[in-house]
Amino acid sequence: MSRLTLAAAFLCGALVGVAAWLLWPERYEQRSAAELMDVVMWGKEPIGGSFSLIDHNGQRRSDADFRGKLLLVYFGFIYCSDICPIDLQAIAGALDKLGPQAEKVQPLFITVDPEKDTPEQLKAHVALFHPRLIGLTGSLAQIRKVAGDFKVYFAKNQPRIRNDRGIDHSGFTFVIDGDGQYVGFFPPATSADQIAAVLRPHLSSLPGS
């Protein structure tokens, strides 16, 4: 191989490598966690929006499927060992405390790790918390779109050991009313009692109450 051909091949390979690096999912640029938290805390921008994702049974579900119910929308991932289990347990506990009124509440767990969290895995995971909990996943682009609409931050962090990958993410539980409009949020580690107490007045205003 001539020097010219070798140089051209090297240059082509380098350009492909640079392009792949720039387009790699980890290069996705988004607003900082602090900025998005500020937006949510002070209600600076609209929160929520339409979505079409795949549930833990492999069925496509959209936000329109849940009209007439109060939505509790939580973003996390299956292998989260920090706040996710605590918040999901609190949501489940709140549903139990609401008794029959819980039929008007639909909790949703939207994964921020769609590359790993398949519908089958989500099905086993949500069953650990509450039978009414629905797990949702989709393509990475779809998850980014929904997370962006809800002003949710998520990004892979640096693994502490090989194959140990965690994801930094917002820990808010968002409340959407029966018409699909944003109501407010619960901060991380809100207790089941607090969630139930806040939801009761909203449930009383739903049709059929």
Image: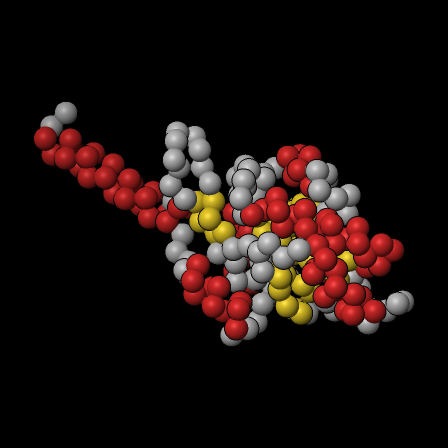
Q: Position of residue 192 (x, y in %)?
A: 70, 54
Residue occupying the point 77% across, 47% down: 132
Quadrant assignment for the C terminus: bottom right
Q: Nearer the viewer, residue 141 or 93?
A: 93
In the visual, does 207 lie left or right of 190? Answer: right
Q: Nearer the viewer, residue 23 or 28?
A: 28
Q: Nearer the viewer, residue 123 or 41?
A: 41
Q: Residue furthest right?
A: 208
Q: Where residue 164 sits in the image (x, y, percent)?
A: 44, 33
Q: Viewed as shown, does residue 175 lie left or right of 158?
A: right
Q: Residue at x 57, y 56 (%)?
A: 188
> Is residue 156 visible from the viewing direction of this image?
yes
Q: Position of residue 195 (x, y in %)?
A: 70, 60
Q: Is residue 59 visible?
A: no
Vertical relation: 148 (above or below) 202 = above
Q: Is residue 58 above or below residue 172?
A: above
Q: Quadrant of the N terminus?
A: top left
Q: Kindly give the residue lying farthest to the top in the view shown.
A: 1
